[in-house]
Image (cartoon, helix red, strand yellow):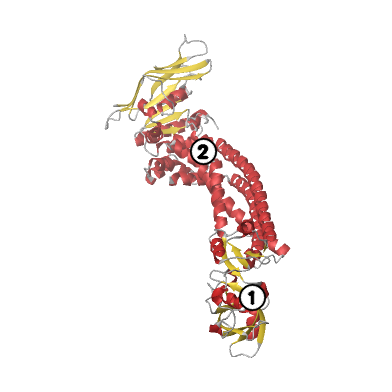
Amino acid sequence: MTLLVTLALRALFRDWIFVFCNVAVLAGVIVPLLVLYGVRNGVYDALIGDLMANPATLQIDTAGNQSFTPADLAEVQGWEDVRFATLKTRSLFDYVNVRATGGRGRQEALIAPSGTGDPMIAPLPGLGPDEVAVSPALATQLGLSAGDGVEIFTQAENRPRQLVLNARVAGVLPPGRLDGRVVMADIGLLDLIEAFYDGYALPEHGIDSGKPLADRAGSFEGMRVYAAALDRLAPLQDRLETRFGVRTLARTAEVTSVLTLGRNLGLALALTVAVAAAGLAASLIFGFWGEVVRTRRTLANLGLLGLPQWQLSLFPVVQALVTAVLGLCVSFLLFRLTAALAERLFETGLTERGGLVSVSPAEALAIAAAVIAFVGCASLAAARAALATDPATVLREET
Amino acid sequence: MADALVLRDLGVSLADGDRGFALRVPELSIAAGETVGLTGPSGTGKTLLLELLGLLRVPDAGGVYRLCPGDAPERDLTALWTRRGRIARLRGRLFGFVPQTGGLLPFLTLSENVALPQRICGRPDPGLVRDLIDRLGLGPVAGLRPERLSIGQRQRAAIARALAHRPRFVIADEPTAALDPENAAEAMTLLFEAAGRTGSAVIVSSHDLDLLGRFALTRYRLALDPDHAPGRPVSRLVAAEDGPEAA
């Protein structure tokens, strides 16, 4: 086998002009396709990256005054498209005052429900009953950092006393995730605030007057749900609206538009690849076949000297595979140059995560394997022709 | 000398539509180290007979084609065609070929061409390669590719290649057809001398009766049967008498 490979390579590189032609044909098809694929990846990744940078993209909020129970929440949490779901209290009571424990200044802030697995507080895994996460703006204004204590004040018009809740800052949210002053807390804490507004007694928090808390029915105004993935957002929104007969708010139109763009770009690329591959296949099949016809005396000679026919059939296959590897090397080199030129020409600043033209190492490896397999298949007709070589040709034909 | 190759009532038939050609070998024995000359007019099947001998052509059923090594059991060579996978290897080991025009591989140097049969057979012997190249006067051009060699040098290189793996038989199909008379005689002399050193039998076909007449050969002649059917000639091998004859 070593001898066969050696002879095939010696024969191949003696006629370097034919190698050059085949490598040029390969590169002429592969490089434009790589650039198209890279641009499709670069643009699409940038758009998807922008969407995914904010977990709120996956968020679905119920609108208006509805009535959800913990059983409803449990049902939604069981849906496979749901990454996280939480109940919401009435938006009327969303604002609280926050002060650092022992501090002097207070700031009004929006309070929002959260819980274990909430993508909005990631990388925090969840919040305990007396823990909160705060937005960067609120943290800056109150000088808060993880581990600090805070007091959350609520004042209702019909209550003689303020409700004061003590909590610990579990973490400050990453910049850009939530604008303004926001406190995220466990739904239990928000439910407590709502009960305070509704006039219930909360003796463990110093509110002795009011209706007994045991009489309170467990009902919530809304629900906030996060889809497991971008392409699950629209189906999940439909399901929520159908199941509960409610209207919801989400960035579905924006997400669907980007996903459709990606799908259409992928289809256009697939069509281009199919047409190019058909042309390339025809070119390679006839090229390799013609090469066997041209060098049939060489093959016949090797057969005459005792090389079995099946080894002769591998002769063009070995040459084709080596040509494919050379073609790939040249193609990726030209692709890198083209990509660098494109980045320099356009200077789009399209994304901070990657360039305009993007092909990952894993994708490059997969493309290389596909090209080698493709070229190997294209050489099978040549292999068949080599298999039919008659060694007696050497004795019968004159040069 | 013990017989090494024995053919008896062996034939090969070719057909192409209404036309056909048949070659019949009633009796042919080639001993180890023997030199055999094969003559006959064009179209009588000299190359076809060499192909038959060299395991390049399937014989008709019913004949005998046997290898009798002397130091090993006899072997029925017609049976090989039922399992063709082993034919190429056996052909490579048993035979060396000298085609009309050298048949060297253009991408190998002369010395690499000569060593190639050894590599294919798995019997490397660089010493014999060097010896053959030197004896055939090819030392100064051993590193050149065939395109840089003269026709005479290519033909001598082909002779060296045919003998490099010490085959039992060398089949030379009009090896001097492309050479002028002086170079032809020299090449033929070198072929027989070199074959004599390696102990190989030589079967050489040629139109040049004068040239063959200079060497002590067992001579055979192919001739068409006079009463063959129209469009289906039959050629038959017969032992040739010494002396001038039509080629």
- Residue A293 x/y as whole percent: 56, 35
Instruction: Give the quadrant of residue A230.
Output: bottom right
Front residue of this view, candidates A363 and A125? A125
Q: Is residue A52 above or below residue B242?
A: below
Most foreground residue, A100 or A74: A74
Q: Position of residue B97 (x, y in %)?
A: 43, 33
Q: Chain of mark 1?
A: A
Residue drawn at x 56%, y 63% is A72
Circle 2 residues within 10 Å: few <14, some 14–19, many ≥20: many
Mark 1, secondary structure of its residue: loop
The secondary structure type at the circle numbered 2 is helix
Residue that numbered label 1 is attached to? A175
Name the image quarter holding residue A91.
bottom right
What type is the residue that disc 2 sits on?
Ala
Is residue B158 visible from the viewing direction of this image? no
Which residue has dot 2 on it?
A: A383
Q: Is residue A162 above or below residue B85?
A: below
Dot 2: chain letter: A
Q: Position of residue B233 (x, y in %)?
A: 49, 14
**Callout 1, which amino acid?**
Pro
